[in-house]
Amino acid sequence: QVQLVESGGGLVQPGGSLRLSCAASGFTFGIYAMSWYRRAPGKERELVAAISGGGGSTNYADSVKGRFTISRDNAKNTVYLQMNTMKAEDTAMYYCNARSPLLGGSNYWGQGTQVTVSS
């Protein structure tokens, strides 16, 4: 059974930091590209950051470059999102995504974790 379980969300003040975790199970984690998406109220879902299966390639939304860092530990089947210098506009539900490297392969989603940036 495939599971992606996010954790680490919460309330943080502007300028603060949070680290999100996504624990994966039920599939071959090390070959899947992993991503973090977010959806703010009234907005469409957007890609925040992505990392390749081996961890050697990453990309980020322009809005988070220099502030957020995605990483993964394939031994622990976990992907992380370190968020620093947070802003009110980072407030959203954050979702973990796993995408198979195979054409037409599986695409999995977690349930999400809420992040609120407010003073």
Image: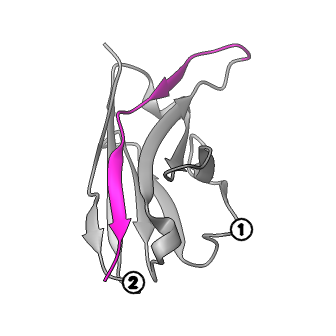
Give the answer, above or below, for where 117 lies relative to 97. below
Give the answer, above or below, for where 30 lies relative to 93. above
| Front one among 18 and 79 | 18
Query: Dot 1, how many residues are within 10 Å of its Cα: few (below 14), some (14-19), or many (20+)?
Result: few
Front label number (1 vs 2): 2
Q: Position of residue 13 (x, y in %)?
A: 32, 81
Q: Position of residue 58 (x, y in %)?
A: 64, 56
Query: Dot 2, how many residues are within 10 Å of its Cα: few (below 14), some (14-19), or many (20+)?
Result: some
Between discs 1 and 2, the one toward the N terminus = 2
Report the disc number at residue 50: none
Does residue 44 appear to the left or right of 83 in the view shown?
right
The amino acid on which the numbered mark 1 sits, given as a three-letter code, is: Asp
Residue 18: quarter of image? bottom left
| Front one among 25 and 95 | 95
Q: Residue at x 47, y 57 (%)?
A: 71
Q: Position of residue 74 (x, y in %)?
A: 40, 43
Does residue 61 appear to the left or right of 40 in the view shown?
right
Q: Position of residue 63 (x, y in %)?
A: 65, 69
Q: Secondary structure at mark 2?
A: loop
Q: Residue at x 63, y 15 (%)?
A: 105
Q: Secondary structure at mark 1?
A: loop
- Residue interval drawn in magenta: 103-119
Question: Mark 2 sits on what residue?
Answer: 14
Does residue 68 appear to the left or right of 10 in the view shown?
right
Residue 86: quarter of image? bottom left
Residue lying farthest to the front in this orientation? 42
Question: Mark 1 sits on what residue?
Answer: 62
Give the answer, above or below, for where 95 lies relative to 114. above
Q: Residue at x 68, y 18 (%)?
A: 102
Is-magenta flag for residue 68? no
| Front one among 53 and 18 | 18
